[in-house]
Amino acid sequence: MRQTRAVHQAIKQVLRERSLTYADVAPIMQVSESTVKRLFARHQLSLERIETICDWLNIDFIELATLSRQAEKRITSLTDDQERRLLADPKLFLVAYMLVNHWSESEITELFDFSTTDMIRMLAQLDRMGLIELLPMNRVRLLTTRNFEWNPTGPVADYVRRVVLKEFMHSTFQKPGEKQVFVSGMLSRAAILKMHKLMAQTVRRFDDLVYQDLVLPAAERYGVSLLSCMRPWEFSRFSDYRKQPNEKQFAALERQDR
């Protein structure tokens, strides 16, 4: 249904851009203006009528599909309440996490022991939350934007800090595929802000590689976590040897630093 609404919204967008009204569309469809209004309001344009309008507007289905995808409401994050609901149901959180990371429903059920009933229940919940669109035959279409992220001050991020990172760091990072780099030094404010930008570039490059590998089946991809940490900081045991407490504070970011 979301795709149908998006197509109708795309057509209305084209009409607005060309200063056309339902009254202009009516003779093209050979119906009254009130009928046009009703069909658009109820998202009931048939494929044949959509094709007629596209011919009249001189746009093809590919262009309309692109516009409909742009018109579709997609989410960049969840509310704190939605994140808490996910965390309250470990199975639901797992499914949501896998879907956001572009696993298909079949790949999830192939790896995890979820009954069909349980899986449908969880997919229906995620559909109501707007995270996915549940299609016929329990197929799934992700409704998140490419830059979707958990709220950095929300429940999921807090859970990651308290639980996930603790487990993630419990490693020597010496096994195949593992790597840990920890360096220390004295940097100026300008250099620190430059490193922030380089870290953001690394994250974007990681994201690019994730999307690049989506063409591969899940069996050929590995669940990978990348931890990139940096902050003005002094090891507490070093601070114990200071004559005076370290009172140096890093100034708040100014607009031009961002």
Image: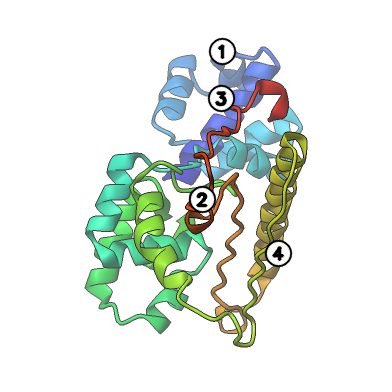
Residue 154 seen from this side? yes
Contact, CB < 8 Å: mark 4 with mark 3?
no
Mark nearer the N terminus (3 vs 2): 3
Label 1: element kind: helix
Q: Residue at x 54, y 74 (%)?
A: 223
Q: Nearer the viewer, mark 1 or mark 2?
A: 2
Q: Earlier in the sequence, mark 4 or mark 1?
A: 1
Furthest residue in direction bottom, as rendered? 176
In terms of sequence position, does the residue under pointer 4 or pointer 2 come before the other?
A: 4
Circle number at residue 239: 2
Q: Position of residue 210 (x, y in %)?
A: 65, 64
Above-or-below relation of 121 to 220 = above
Q: Secondary structure at mark 2?
A: helix
Which residue in the structure is indicated by mark 4? 209
How far apart are the alpha carbons under marks 4 and 3?
50 Å
The amino acid type found where label 4 is placed reads: Leu
Q: In 3D space, how far apart are the residues under numbered discs 4 and 1 (Cα atoms)?
A: 49 Å
**Mark 3 sits on what residue?**
30
Amino acid marked by disc 3: Gln
Q: Are marks 3 and 2 in contact (CB under 8 Å)?
A: no
**Disc marking residue 23:** 1
Pinpoint residue 120: horizontal percent, then vertical percent: 28, 66
Of the numbered discs 1 and 3, the one sitting upstream in the chain is 1
